[in-house]
Image (tube, rainbow, N blue to C red):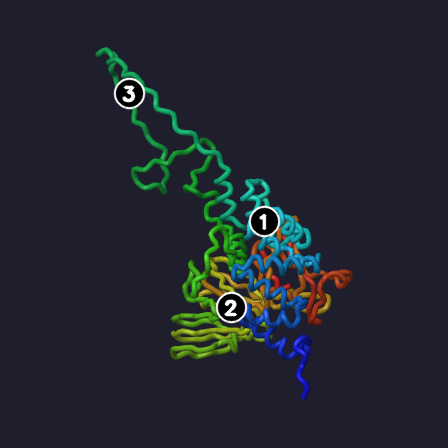
Amino acid sequence: MPERDPLVAPPFDQGVFLLHYNRGREAFQEARYAEARRELENAQRMRPDDADVLNLLGLVYFKTNAFPEAEVIYRRLADENPNVFILHSNLGLILFKQGKLDESETFLLRAIELRPNYAKSHLYLGLLYRQRRKYALALEHLRFAGADKIVREVEAEIRPQSPAPLPMPVVPTPPPLRRETQRINTQKITPITDARTAPGRTMMTQPGKVPMPAGSTQPGVIDTAHTAARKLQDAVDETQLADDKRLDLAHKIEGASKTFTLHENGFLEINFGRSVHVKRGTVSSYSGNLKFVAESGLLGTTAQTLVKAVGQGKIFVYEKGRKTFLLDLNEEFIYVEGSNLLALEDTLTYRVEPIYDSTYQRKIDTVKIFGKGSLAISTHIEPLTLRVTREYPLSISSNALVAWTGNVIPTVMDDKSLENVMIENVDEAGFKIRFEGDGVVVSEQ
């Protein structure tokens, strides 16, 4: 048998390529980045121009802070795909991380031009302008991104410092009055009080104004829609901001509940004392005497995969190939497309409120979840957090909808011309939805 010429490359093996690529993708989804990098680099050697491999390898480089390597890949992808907003946004973020602010600004502006609603592009452009002390532009983009905490920090930076207090003037002691003029007005002084005020306390009032509790603007009114929108955006984006903190091995949510713990390897740990809802087919293991029952209120919807675990114990939930997000509600609400619900605490209330396309008798099953407690959402791919404002309404395919919240109204779009513009629905039941108002939409496209 003749020897093979060492200068001749071996024939391409599609099966071996897919093996490396799929192993790399699975390792990336489970946050095993060293393994993902090794497998994807092997796949790239076999197909150097494969866009899927390059994109995933660029994400691995970014996750492991290999920014120069990530920059090389995303420069190439953005150059070859000038109208794909996410490539420009990712490249702008990578350049920002390296302090290349001029180029970062160019690519982030291009990303916003292509997709005005993408919150993360606005966020990093706002942070960029903050570094340059262009505070007006920084606040504009940070507010659009819903980064309320950073907005307050920037406002504090530009607020003028209060001048030092002036020394109190020395008032000379008046001479004593003559004896015959030392008379005291004995009329009793009665302070203005309120029946709700504790005994002995005085409530100061001004003419024409009603006393208000300290620090409040409208008594009893809480903008729950706004806070829920901010929480949803934070939960999905997991943005590491000023100090780039790394996630702990067990990332725990705080607030209304500590029932759910999301581990870095993708496992969701649930500790409960009464009951919890989990997605059928995702329970890896459990301890305790538990009983699993179907939820009759969800039959016939895309959320019918949820089952109720009754008892006291611990459940480990895992969905291979999907990304999980935790959200903590505190008397707030969120709408989730039924098939994306992974787990739900029993302290939350839910009801199915579909979005109907009455013209063609189609619907998408969204579940309204409200109250105080925790829930878990899972998605096929890395989702996008998209802002909805009065100036920038949002239109997406119903097949891409994951969740939404805020003061937003969804309506079905019956416009055939959009079929030539927007991504084609893979499902015949899909349709286009327009969101108007002020809030956040999570999309998988």
- The first of marks 3 and 1 along the sequence is 1
Q: Quadrant of residue 379?
A: bottom right
Q: Secondary structure at mark 3?
A: loop
**Mark closer to the observer (3, 1):** 1
Residue 444 or 398: which is nearer the viewer? Answer: 444
Label 1 residue SS:
loop
Disc 1 to disc 2, how far (Cα)? 26 Å
* Vertical order, 166 against 315 (above or below): above
Q: CA distance from mark 2 to mark 3?
A: 86 Å
Say whether marks 2 and 3 touch (CB < 8 Å). Answer: no
Q: Count the marks: how many?
A: 3
Which sits in the foreground, 108 or 321? 108
Q: Are marks 1 and 2 in contact (CB under 8 Å)?
A: no
User: Which residue has dot 1 on it?
Assistant: 100
Residue at horizontal 57 percent and vertical 44 percent from the top:
129
Amino acid tagged 2: Ala
Residue closer to the observer: 242 or 74? 74
Q: Image height check: is 46 above or below 117?
A: below
- Badge 2 marks a residue whose secondary structure is helix
Q: Quadrant of the C terminus?
A: bottom right
Image point (46%, 48%), residue name: 220
- Which numbered marker is on residue 34? 2
Q: Report crowding for label 1: few under 14, some 14 to 19, many 20 or more residues within 10 A (C-alpha).
A: some
Q: Quadrant of the N terminus?
A: bottom right
Q: Answer whether residue 333 is visible to the viewer in this image.
A: no
Dot placed on the residue nearer the N-terminal end, 2 or 3? 2
Q: Which residue is mark 3?
A: 185
Q: Which mark is residue 89?
A: none
Residue 180 rendering spot, x and y as whole percentages: 23, 11
